[in-house]
Amino acid sequence: MLQKTFTPKRTVCKVKFSIPADWATDTAALSGDFNNWEASSHKMVKKNGSWVIELRLQPSKSYQFKYLCDAEWKNDDQADQYLENDFGSVNSVLVLED
């Protein structure tokens, strides 16, 4: 699930990324073009039956991303869009409109 909250002046969008706890037993991480696809830099935490992380991102942009769940790549089933990637699969896309 993606939850977007813009700051009052709309200079930042706080995005809460959330996936079901059963998607990963041991580790879950968020990876995308906002962190150069570094799988270890945005580890998610397990709380209230979900894996979650919140990022502050720049509005008026689109971001491609995936979740790395116990070494398996997964897409967000509520992404705004999906785009093909160079690996023969698709990436989730988050669109932050003004």
Image (spheres, rainbow, N blue to C red):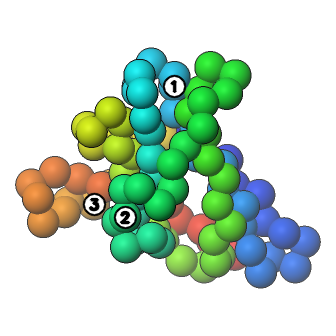
| Gap between marks 1 and 3 measured at Cα | 23 Å
The image shows residue 23, relative to residue 74, as above or below, that is above
Q: Nearer the viewer, mark 1 or mark 3?
A: 1
Q: Position of residue 43 (x, y in %)?
A: 51, 48
Name the image quarter holding residue 59.
bottom right
Q: Position of residue 80 (x, y in %)?
A: 48, 53
> Is 94 left or right of 96, judged from the image as shown?
left
Q: Are marks 1 and 3 in contact (CB under 8 Å)?
A: no
Type of residue at label 1?
A: Pro
Residue under pointer 2: 38
| Gap between marks 2 and 1 measured at Cα | 22 Å
Type of residue at label 3?
A: Leu
Q: Are marks 3 and 2 in contact (CB under 8 Å)?
A: no
Q: Residue drawn 77% across and 81% down?
A: 11
Q: Nearer the viewer, mark 2 or mark 1?
A: 2
The image shows residue 7, relative to residue 29, as above or below, that is below
Residue under pointer 1: 20
Q: Position of residue 69 (x, y in %)?
A: 36, 36
Residue under pointer 3: 83
| Disc 3 element | strand
Name the image quarter holding residue 58.
bottom right
Q: Locate the N terminus and report the quarter of the image it occupies.
A: top right
Type of residue at label 2?
A: Glu
> Is 18 left or right of 11, judged from the image as shown?
left
Q: Earlier in the sequence, mark 1 or mark 3?
A: 1
> Is 93 left or right of 20, judged from the image as shown?
left
For the image, the number of numbered tags is 3
Asked if residue 57 shows in the view, the reply is yes
Q: Nearer the viewer, mark 3 or mark 2?
A: 2
Q: Locate the C terminus and report the quarter of the image it occupies.
A: bottom right
| Gap between marks 3 and 2 measured at Cα | 19 Å
